């Protein structure tokens, strides 16, 4: 039987990156250390998501470099207060079909995907899509989108819950869309159990995922 007290971890993969890719990763890591300097736990989480996403990408056929970049940057806007996230989303014209205050926890990924391409024009759109979707999910998630979404939920520094442990046990062995759907459903359960506002868009995505399954 597995020792439930032993911390979960994943293998560290050694990807043969080009020199340009290694330089880019070093730059992003330097930048996120500055951006999240006042949030050491968030910084550690971001670097951990990056490694976890890189590992999952290497298994599931996504691009490990893009996975690592998206992991490093995904919580960029968590450096800000909740109020600032709402103000920035309003200023950017982000519409969620619900008051921005109610969906505040979902905003930081969407804002980052809008503002960071200007700073990092060398990174592909797939990275920004994954970052945008890491909070909301989508009905048509790419492999990279799913890798970032799941890695965010299970990276080794996250405190385990039964739902997280279930996803960790699947990661790397079950099909990626199954791992994602379990993680996504677990997120909805968490929102309901903690009596938080459940975004209507989340229900639509859930229904679309289920309908695809039964089609
Ligand atoms: Fe996030
Ligand atoms: Fe995160």
Image (cartoon, helix red, strand yellow):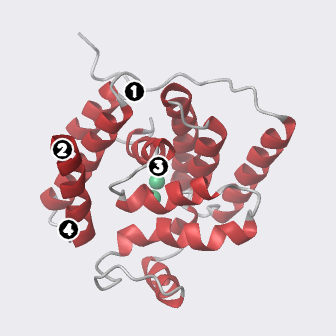
Q: Which mark is residue 215?
A: 2
Does residue 161 show up? no
Residue depicted at 47% across the width and 88% down the height: 90
Question: What's the distance in space between the residues labelled 4 and 3, CA to CA?
Answer: 24 Å
Label 2 SS: loop
Residue at x 48% of width, y 82% of height: 89
Residue drawn at the location 53% of the way across and 74% of the way down? 80
In front of the other: label 3 or label 2? 2
Q: Which mark is residue 196?
A: 4
Instruction: Tell me which label, 4 or 3, sits earlier in the chain.
Output: 3
Q: Residues within 10 Å of mark 4 (few under 14, many from 20)?
A: few
For residue 209, side relative to residue 78 (left or right): left
Q: Secondary structure at mark 1?
A: loop
Q: Secondary structure at mark 4?
A: loop
- Residue marked by disc 1: 8
Q: CA distance from mark 2 to mark 1?
A: 35 Å
| Mark 2 burial class by Cα count in 10 Å: few <14, some 14-19, many 20+ | few
Q: Quadrant of ligand 1?
A: bottom left
Neighbour tally class for label 1: few under 14, some 14-19, many 20 plus, Cα within 10 Å: some
Coordinates of residue 38 in the picture (x, y in percent): 60, 64
- Number of marks: 4
Q: Position of residue 129 (x, y in %)?
A: 52, 59
């Amino acid at each position: 039987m597995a020792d439930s007290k032993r911390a979960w971890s994943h293998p560290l993969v050694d990807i043969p990156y080009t020199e340009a890719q290694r330089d880019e990763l070093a730059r992003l890591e330097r930048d996120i250390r500055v951006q999240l300097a006042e949030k050491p736990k968030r910084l550690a989480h971001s670097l951990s998501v990056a490694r976890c996403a890189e590992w999952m990408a290497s298994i599931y056929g996504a691009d490990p470099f893009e996975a690592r970049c998206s992991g490093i940057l995904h919580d960029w806007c968590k450096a800000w207060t909740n109020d600032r996230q709402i103000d920035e989303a309003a200023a950017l014209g982000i519409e969620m079909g619900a008051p921005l205050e109610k969906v505040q926890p979902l905003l930081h990924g969407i804002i980052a995907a809008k503002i960071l391409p200007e700073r990092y024009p060398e990174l592909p759109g797939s990275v920004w899509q994954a970052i945008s979707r890491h909070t909301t999910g989508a009905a048509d998630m790419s492999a990279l989108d799913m890798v970032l979404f799941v890695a965010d939920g299970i990276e080794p520094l996250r405190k385990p819950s039964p739902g997280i442990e279930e996803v960790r046990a699947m990661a790397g062995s079950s099909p990626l869309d199954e791992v994602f759907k379990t993680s996504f459903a677990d997120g909805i359960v968490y929102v309901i159990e903690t009596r938080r506002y459940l975004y209507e868009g989340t229900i639509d995505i859930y229904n679309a995922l289920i309908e695809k399954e039964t089609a």
